[in-house]
Amino acid sequence: MTASANASIDADYLLVGGGLQNALILLALAARQPQASVLLCERDTALGGNHIWSFQALDMPETARPWAEQLVEYSWPGYQLYFAESARWVEGAYRACSSEHLDRVVQQVVATRPNIRILTNTTVTHCDATSVTLADGRVLRGQLVIDARGPEHSAQRRGGGYQKFVGLECQLRQPVNMNAPILMDTRCAQRDGFRFHYVLPFAADRVLIEDTYFSNTPDLNVDALAAGIVAEAGRLGFDVEKVLRTEVGVLPMPALSTFHPRKTGALIAGYAGGWFNPGTGYSFAAAVRLAEHISNVPVAEVYGDQWKKLVRHQRIQAHFLAFLNLMMFGFFHDSKRAKLMERFYLVADVVVHRFFAMESTLVDMWRIMWVGAPWTPKGWAKRATAPANPLR
Ligand SMILES: Cc1cc2nc3c(=O)[nH]c(=O)nc-3n(C[C@H](O)[C@H](O)[C@H](O)COP(=O)(O)OP(=O)(O)OC[C@H]3O[C@@H](n4cnc5c(N)ncnc54)[C@H](O)[C@@H]3O)c2cc1C
């Protein structure tokens, strides 16, 4: 039923929060349910906040490509990892999208669809199953309310640690010849847990350099870390001319899954609803999967059988990934985490891709536990799954 067919509602879908999750849901609905009316409320002046979202090919399944591919702003053929004693190339598309790009893509789609509206500078104070209350007291009604107000509305972290980082998008004095990201370079002084650099090359003279920690605490001295990135850029091969943008993240890596969808009230989506990967803190794959579901079923059937399957899938994956966090933060000393990561990347590319996409099979889980675990002799682990692709 569309809003026009039911005068008592403002839209079929009321989307609260205009970040990654609801932008994906909006794009999916625009493609799959062109007659549906959608109203999105965002507190800020633009959608998406201040992010670069990275994701792997499998995070965007074939079925989602027709509506999600337009978000691919940057694409690389794979990525590099550097550890103290080894290096590894992981083959397979690695992609990224900035907040500005997301905002642009969504606004372009909305401009052609009178039945999709976005209210920016609009703060929502309360949501329930079919209505939202705005800060100015207005009440909007819909058939389905999807509340994706982001990490600040997440359930309490349950044990584990944090992935925290400061990222600087830098203009370089000298262009560099770098055609793929560095997902992890651990050849830096280790402190505050496990530390590594992450680099995305956007252009020959523009890169994002992140200083990242898998830490027991959420504290982050942004100014000191930003100064440190510029100071260490030389070691990574970059001559920084100026910093164009700063990005900061503190993402919980819970030891117990926080994914417990409620059966009443608004549908809590995105990071706040536990639709993220506890092992990486990333949410792109889970957010795409949820957007696929919502756009594939009529609004009245969102909680039908497909929902139960989807929830079961997310729950199993989230428990597995949270268990890995329990091991990493609970069983191993900080100084062992770098080794743990090096061991994890002994598994085959496809296992890595499925791990990030929250698509691990039972065999993958066993491989990650067996090959990646420190109790497996390194020689055995290497023989069990030697990287399929040559190092670049
Ligand atoms: C710096 C950073 C980098 C990240 N990088 C990646 C990455 O590379 N890949 C990846 O997969 N994941 C990444 N993540 C994790 C995750 O994907 C993001 O946090 C993602 O943005 C979560 O999507 P979301 O829609 O749930 O929340 P958000 O994108 O945070 O969106 C929430 C939106 O709700 C709005 N809002 C909040 N309160 C209200 C209110 N009361 N009324 C109206 N609007 C409101 C906010 O302004 C915001 O726009 C990153 C997280 C951070 C913090």
Image (spheres, rainbow, N blue to C red):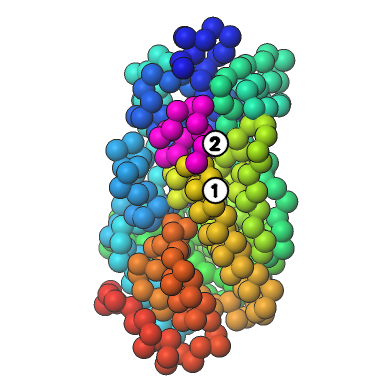
Q: Is residue 149 visible?
A: yes
- Please tell me the numbered disc located at residue 303: 2
Which is more toward the observer, 9 or 264? 264
Q: Position of residue 31 (x, y in %)?
A: 34, 29
Quarter holding the C terminus is bottom left
Q: Was residue 304 drawn as part of the magenta stretch in this picture?
A: yes
Q: Quadrant of residue 64?
A: top left
Q: Residue at x 71, y 26 (%)?
A: 125
Amino acid type assigned to the residue bearing label 2 in the image: Tyr
Q: Is residue 274 above or below residue 231?
A: above
Measure how far apart labels 1 and 2 are at the Cα level: 10 Å
Q: Secondary structure at mark 1?
A: helix
**Upstream in the sequence, badge 1 or badge 2?**
2
Q: Which secondary structure type mostly characterizes the magenta part of the structure?
A: helix
User: Can residue 203 be spotted in the picture?
Assistant: no
Look at the numbered disc 1 and say if its residue's Cβ is closer than 8 Å to ligand 1.
no
The kind of residue on which mark 1 rests is Val
Q: Which residues are magenta?
A: 291-305
Q: Residue at x 66, y 41 (%)?
A: 262
Tell me the quarter of the picture where residue 148 sits: top right
For the residue carrying disc 1, how many other residues have a C-alpha within 10 Å: few (<14), some (14-19), or many (20+)? some
Residue 87 vs residue 225: left or right? left
Question: In the image, 68: left or right of 315?
Answer: left
Magenta span includes 352? no
**Residue occupying the far top of the picture:** 7
Report helix, strand or loop for mark 2: loop
- Ligand 1: quadrant of the figure: top right
On the image, the x and y values in percent for residue 30 come to 38, 27
Give the x, y percent position of residue 54: 43, 52
- Report the residue marked by disc 1: 311
Q: Are marks 1 and 2 in contact (CB under 8 Å)?
A: no
Structural crowding at the residue carrying mark 2, measured as other residues with C-alpha within 10 Å and reported as few (<14), some (14–19) or many (≥20): some
